[in-house]
Image (cartoon, grey):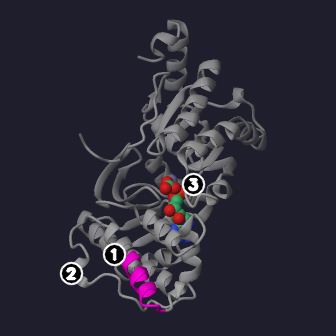
Amino acid sequence: MLGGAFLTKGKMYDTLNKFNALKDKENVTVLGIESSCDETAASVVRNGREVLSSVISSQINIHRLFGGVVPEVASRNHTLAVNNVIDEALEKAGLSLGDIDAIAVTYGAGLVGALLVGVTSAKALSYATGIPLIKVNHIEGHISANYVAFPDLKPPFLSLVASGGHTCLIDVKDYNDFTLLGSTRDDAIGEAFDKTARLLGLPYPGGPEIDRLAKIGKNNIQFLSKKQVREDFSLSYSGLKTAVVNYIHNARQRGEEIVIEDVCASLTHTAVDILVDTTLKVAKGVGRDKIVLAGGVASNSYLRESLLSRGKEEGYEVLFPPPVLCTDNAVMIASRAYFSIKEGKDLADLTLNAQPSLRVGVKK
Ligand code: KG4
Ligand code: ZN
């Protein structure tokens, strides 16, 4: 029930009517809010593809001191930043709340305390203004970044989502129709990069550092044997992480020199080759001709190059957004919400809660 016990019936129907009217409205302007990990972000996006503003307040420098994201510290800093970030997004768009048709917020997956800051702020704004509140799945948001980057992009396509928390292959049949085809059984690829980087003494987040060093290193260390690479549609990165850990420990014990650049290049090639092999296998199996990359690791240079060239060889069109739309942002959240709104889906009320383990495309 919309609003639960908190709203009067009149206010409830008013919001519902507003939401229903958006289906046929020519221009729909959405305020997006994202706070699932260590970026507090807000945006204003029109019709799912036109960015009017995007503000990202990153906590990377704070978490770098600890070598990784500290959840409690993340929540506190989101609380400090969220109102200013929203105000700035509206100001940059040259709009006020009265011009906003819907408020979209990430409600999962992510860190529970971090998510709650965005969800609570969005609920408060929606309650105070009567603007419909739309709940957004973070992973679906990552995929939607491609609709912003490629104005003519339409489903169906296969999406490879590679981030710090997720590595999965999703068949996007339509704007609101997702089917999970394969995913990592354990760690995400970004997690493998971040944890290995920490071991190598590189700053957080490790992914971009590993990317930079891999370019000057040699792919000359074999971390996994052919036997260890999975042949099905699922992926596994914890084995690779352990192999790198063992390599470093053994080399240190033997007093051998560790060439960090070579470790980075070999790790990157191994992790990415597995991902590209699996992606191409799944694309063939599902019969899609377009492969769309998404998530923070989609910024990785070797992943982009490799998927593009190998995909092309096999006849696929391969797309990926610019790096600023790959890592966490609120443009992708506002974009995702637009496509829900047009199908009358994902309206939320004041009972909306954070869902830290929210998945995507898993049919019940
Ligand atoms: O999508 P994202 O910003 O947050 C999550 O939803 O997890 O992804 C963050 C992840 C981190 O693991 C980070 O190290 C990785 O993306 N990353 C990269 C690169 N840029 C960010 N990994 C490899 N190469 C990069 N250039
Ligand atoms: Zn993300």
Type of amino acid under label 1: Ile
Q: Is residue 255 magenta?
A: yes
Q: Separation of disc 2 and disc 3 at Cα?
A: 40 Å
Q: Residue at x 63, y 39 (%)?
A: 76
Type of amino acid under label 2: Lys
Label pair 2/1, CB-CB below 8 angstroms: no
Point out the image quarter for the N terminus.
top left
Label pair 2/3, CB-CB below 8 angstroms: no
Range shown magenta: 245-256
Q: Separation of disc 1 and disc 3 at Cα?
A: 28 Å
Q: Is residue 66 magenta?
A: no
Q: Residue at x 56, y 26 (%)?
A: 123
Q: Residue at x 26, y 63 (%)?
A: 286
Asked whether residue 305 is in view, the answer is: yes
In this rendered view, identify the residue nearer to me: 76 or 350. Answer: 76
In percent of width and height, residue 206 lies at 55, 68
Q: Earlier in the sequence, mark 2 or mark 3?
A: 3
Viewer-nearest of discs 1 and 3: 1
In this rendered view, identify the residue nearer to me: 201 or 329. Answer: 201
Identify the secondary structure beneath mark 3.
helix
Q: Residue beneath label 3, please?
A: 148
Q: Residue beneath label 1, please?
A: 274
